[in-house]
Each structure stands twice: as structure tokens, then as C-alpha cells.
Amino acid sequence: MQSDLVIVYHRQPFEEVRVDGATEYREHTSPNGIVPTLKNFVQTAEQGAWIAWKHVDEVGGEVDQPRVTMSDRHGDYEVVRIGLTAAQVESFYHVTSKAALWPVLHSFALHFDAQAADWDTFRDVNRRFAEAACAEASDDALIWIHDYNLWLVPAFIREIKPDAKIAFFHHTPFPSADLFALLPWRDEIVDSLLACDIVGFHIPRYAENFAQVARSLRNVEVEEKLAVEPGLSPQGAALSEPEVTTKLRIDGHTVRLDAWPIGTNPVLIQQVLSEPAAERRLERIRTELAGQQLIISVGRVDYTKGTIETLLAYERLLERRADLHGKIKLMVTSVAAATGMTVYEDTRGDIEQQVGRIHGRFASLDWGPIMLYTTPVPFEELLSYYRAADMCWITPLRDGLNLVAKEFVASRHAGDPGVLLLSEFTGCSVELPDAVTTNPYSQDDLDAAIDRSLAMTDEERIDRMGRLSESVDHFDIEHWAEHIFKQFHELR
């Protein structure tokens, strides 16, 4: 039976585990994030499917189980898997996507390496995703594609199924027109995105950037431009955008542009933290801290995440504030998201070197200034650290959204005096103006923001956190889902 909703996302919506020689498919251990939400969308369709990749040994090889029927708390859904070899994944994902496209998306032009890209393989993999989606979709299905590594899928779908409704959502920033122009494949990418019926972004700035790119490369007409939703564009912020293009028209075809940030799940987070096991974890953490202030900084190994800048800012804090020695601790999680990539291995090495150097410089027998985690911290345990922390430093040099900042806010009790220090170049900064925002490119600005956070009274901390909580509770994952439902309903 063909599906009326097909989600195309490179990641499988389950964990694959070998047990006693047999394969078991299990729900992801973390119940938070985008994957559970997308699975809920599949349940809204009379018949839904999910397209992902699966490793195979040789090009054209068959996947052992190309179709998996899953049954978990989100219901029953079909997962169709296309086979990619390790070499294809390396080329398509680790090299072309991460080495060539990722730097431009995040405004790191000096990291852009066009010569490293294998565009033919990238195009071929995108075509295979499109063919798999079309094989599952009814003629007038809604096909929802996720993220930049599948940029070319919409054009292939439009060729195969002209009447399909095509939606695309970006989980990354979208760069300005002059940066996007660095991509030698810019025409092919833009033509593919303009084949969509709706293109979604986290915040208005990214949608407006895409509109400018489309206008600079193609003869498109701005059909509609609206004032930005209240709460998503504070005046004076680095990523403020008071108006946003919502419809473009090209060759008689209307493309909707949507800007709506993904939220977290505050109800779930509070539920997890109310469990007895969470109370025990929290008590253990506070006992181990022995009265020290805890600062937490959570991210991946990536040059865009600003981890080095955070560590150096912490070192400068310890230099100028000897009174904090023995009374403060920074917990950093920096987990490798991709293996075998030189740029990320170099970043990981730099992070470990800086942590070791700072620790060696300031540590004493009874005090270690930094804890570094390079392996994933379980979601439930991470929430307990959020609850125990006095401050959370989220200071990427560029980030599409950043759910960690929202999770930290959602973990707090009412009246809890935590402080969120947030880079103004994270997408979520437009939603969270009551955080202490900072420009991580400026040492002086970052140091001043840290000092301001430390000097803040409990009264001000509670007041700010209350307003942050209101925003996180309002723009939660259900709010995002309801908005997308409405957009899709209008599209159909």
C-alpha cells in the first residue's frame, strides 16, 4: 500500500542492536529531540513511511532487511532502507556534506574545500533517496525531506512525481547570498529547493537569507512578506529580522517559506526529573560538588561550537578571579559526531589539549577545575546535571538552533536561580532574549558576559529564568508540531 506521508531523513528512527547473533530494533534511548516528533507525524497519516540509509558491503548491494516494521510507543510505522557502502557514506556525508557544505552553511568560508567534494556521488545518493521515496508515495503524497545533505532530493522527486507535495526542513543555518555563492553547485541546489511547495527554517533570518539567494540567482517574485511572529525577533539582536518573505513565485509555481523553531519537551523533562532515580542522581551530584558552583557546557566536537573559546574564557576567569579557585567547576561535554574527519579530529585534539593545560595550571590536590566528557552522557543523567548547575554556557560561533539551551531552561524548577549564557549567533537566541547574550568572537564581550552572570543577584536570576521558561514552554515541541500540521493542511 502506498503512503500519503513519506519522511526522508538520513538517520534511522531506531537503534539497531545485535543480541545473541540476532538483530533487534529498539527505540532510541533518548526520548527527546526531533526523531520522536517525526515519528509522531508518521502516525497522523493513514499510511506513512520513513526513508533512511543502511550500510552495505558493496555498491548496489541489497540491505539484509530493506523494510522494517517498527512498533513502539509512537505506534507502528514502516522504515525503508537504501543501501550505501562505507565509501559512499564517507563521500556523500563526511566529505561533501561536512567538508564542503557545512562550512558555508555556518559562515566558515576558510574551512570550505570545493575540491574535496565528490558532487557526482552526492547527486547519485540524493537520487536514490528520491527514488525510494517516490516508490513508497502515492501520486499526491506529501513527501517531507530533512536537512541540507538531501538538498537535491526535491528536484528528483518533482521529475518522478509531478503532483506530489514536497516539503523541506533545514536543521542548520542558511547563509547569506554572498556566502552561498561560494558553492559551485549553487544553481542546482536552488533549483531543487524551488521545486518544493514549502521550505522550512528555524528562524526568520535563515528564511530571509534563502529568499535573497533565490532572488539573486533566479527570476523569482516575492509574493508575500509578513511581520515576524511576536517572540521570534527581538529588536537589536544579531539575528533579528522584523519582516520575513513567506511566499516566492517562479514560473507559475508558489514556494512557501516558513520559519518556526523546533522546541524541546518541557513536560517530559520535568517528568524525568521527578522520578526517584533523578532525585538520587541530583543528590549524588550535589554531594560530589561539595558547595562548588557548577557551570555546564554541552556540545559536539565541531569547530562551529565555540568549545575552545569557552575553555579560554574559563581560563581567563580563573586568572582574574583567584577567589573562585576551589569554588567553581566547569563541566564540558564534547562528543565526536563523525569519525575519520581530519578537521574534527584536530578540533578534538585541541579541546583535550586545552583542558589538560588549564587543569594542570590551576588544579590542586582537592580541586579539579574542569570535567571533560568525550563520550555521550545519558539523557536522564544530563538532565540531572542541568538541574544541579548554577550556569549553562552555550557559546557556539554559529548554530542553527541549539536545543541544549532550551533543555537547560526546561530542567529548572519554578523559582530556580540558574543563568543561561548564550551566544547571539545561535538560532534560539531570538526566542531567548532574557539569557545573558554574548558575542563569542570577542574576548572582551565574552568575559564581560561571564562577569555579569556571576555578579547577578538571585532575584534577577529568578526573574530572567521565569521569562526564559515562558518562552521555552510556549515554543515547545508540540507547538512546533501544531504549526507544521497547519502548514501541511493548508498545503494540501
Image (cartoon, grey):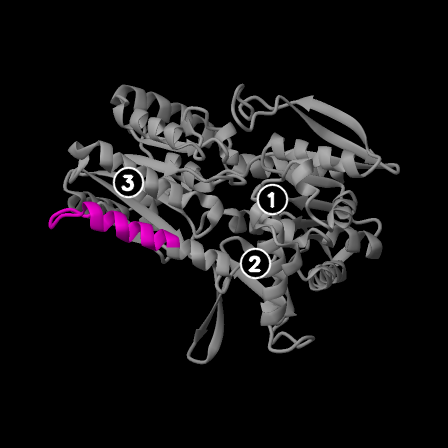
Residue for badge 1: 105
The reply to whether residue 274 is in sight is no
Tell me which residue sits at (29%, 27%) in the image.
451
> Distance between the Cα atoms at labels 3 and 1?
30 Å
| Label 3 secondary element | helix
- Check the picture and name the quadrant holding the N terminus: bottom right
Q: How many marks?
A: 3
Q: Quadrant of residue 289?
A: top left
Q: Is residue 48 magenta?
A: no
As drawn, 233 above or below 160? above
User: Extreme bottom residue here?
Assistant: 21
Q: Left or right? Give the position of 95 relative to 379.
A: right
As drawn, 253 above or below 460? below
* Nearer to the camera, 42 or 197: 197
Residue 149 drawn at (x, y percent) = 64, 54
Residue for badge 2: 11
Bounds of the magenta segment:
350-368
Amino acid bearing label 2:
Arg
3 or 1: tag closer to the N-terminus: 1
Residue 159 drawn at (x, y percent) = 84, 54
Tell me which residue sits at (49%, 56%) in the image.
343
How crowded is the residue under tag 2: few (<14 C-alpha within 10 Å), some, or many (20+)?
some
Residue for badge 3: 315
